[in-house]
Image: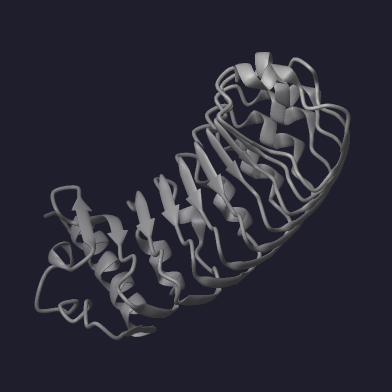
Amino acid sequence: MNSVGAVDADTDTLALLSFKSVVSDSQNVLSGWNLNSSHCTWFGVTSANNGTRVQSLRLAGYGLSGMIHPRLSNLTCLQLLDLYNKSFYGQLQLDFSHLSLLQNINLARNSINGTIPVGLCHCYNLEEIYFKHNQLIGNLPSDLGDLSRLRILDVAVNNLTGVIPPTFGNLSSLTVLSLEKNQFFAKIPNELGHLHNLQKLQLSENQFEGKIPYSIYNISSLIYLSVSQNMLVGEIPTDMGLALPNLADVYLAHNQLEGPIPRSLSNA
C-alpha cells in the first residue's frame, strides 16, 4: 500500500471509530471495531480498492442508537449507507459534498430531525434515497432535481412542507416518488408528467389543492397512484384507464373530486 492509500485507509478507520464512539450498541455488534484488526474485516463494513476503502456500511436493525457522527463524511469511497433502524436521532450533519460516489442512502424509520441537507444534491450518483418515517422539516431542495440517476425518493411520514419543486420533472430515471403523510401544499406540478419511467406515485395525506394535472395521466408506466386525503378538485378523465394501462392500484378518496368513476378503469 502506498503512503496515500495508507492515509486514506487510516481516515476511514478513524471515521468508523468516531461513529462507534457516539453510538449505543446494546447487542455489541461493534465490539470487533478496534485497532487490533483492519476496518475491512469489521461487522457491517464492505471494502473496495484492494480492501482499503469503505464501500458500504450496513448496520440496519441491530439495536444501535445515537447520533450519526459527521466524520462518516470522510468515507469518500462510500457507495451505500444503510442505517435503517428506528433509533438514530438528531440532525443529519454529514458533508455530502465529500460523498460524491454515494448511490444508496437508507435512514428510514429513525428519529432524524432538521432539514434535508442541500449538499445531498451534489451526490450525482445517487439512485435511492430512503428517509421515510423520520422527523424531517422544511422544504424539498429544488436541486434534488439534478440527480438524473435517482430511481427512488421516499420521504414519506415526516413533517416536510412547501411545494413539490417543478425541477422534479427532470428526474428522468425516477420510478418511485413517495411523499405521503407530510404537509405539502399548493398544486401538484405539471412537470411530474415528464417522469416517463415513474411506476409509483404516493402523494396522499397532504394538503395538495387544485386539479390533478392532466400530464399525470400520460405516465403510461404508472402502476400505483395515491392522492387520497388532500383537497383536490375536478373530474377524473373518462379515459384514465386507457391512458394508464398498467395501473393496478389507485386511491383518490377524501378529496373534493366530482363526476362518475370512469368506466375505462376496468381496462386498467
Q: Nearer the viewer, residue 230 or 65?
A: 230
Task: Residue 260: give x, y in percent of width and height.
Answer: 84, 26
Does residue 136 show up?
yes
Give left or right: position of 160 versus 267: right
Quadrant of residue 170 within the rendered picture? top right
Q: Nearer the viewer, residue 181 or 95?
A: 181
Question: Is 35 placed above or below 5 here?
Answer: below
Q: Residue at x 88, y 28 (%)?
A: 259
Task: Residue 197: give x, y in percent of width and height.
Answer: 55, 24
Question: Is 259 placed above or below 46 here?
Answer: above
Does residue 76 show up?
no
Quadrant of residue 101 within the rendered picture? top left
Q: Residue at x 45, y 39 (%)?
A: 125
Q: Residue at x 29, y 67 (%)?
A: 11
Q: Quadrant of the C terminus?
A: top right
Q: Quadrant of the N terminus?
A: bottom left
Q: Residue at x 10, y 73 (%)?
A: 37
Instruction: Describe the colour scheme in one phrase.
Output: one colour
Question: Is 263 placed above or below 23 here?
Answer: above
Count of marks overlaid on the render? 0
Task: Residue 59: give x, y in percent of width and height.
Answer: 31, 66
Give left or right: position of 37 versus 14: left
Give left or right: position of 32 versus 140: left
Q: Nearer the viewer, residue 73 or 260?
A: 260
Question: Is 86 placed above or below 46 here?
Answer: below
Quadrant of residue 15 within the rendered picture? bottom left
Task: Residue 220: give x, y in percent of width and height.
Answer: 61, 18
Give left or right: position of 265 versus 153: right
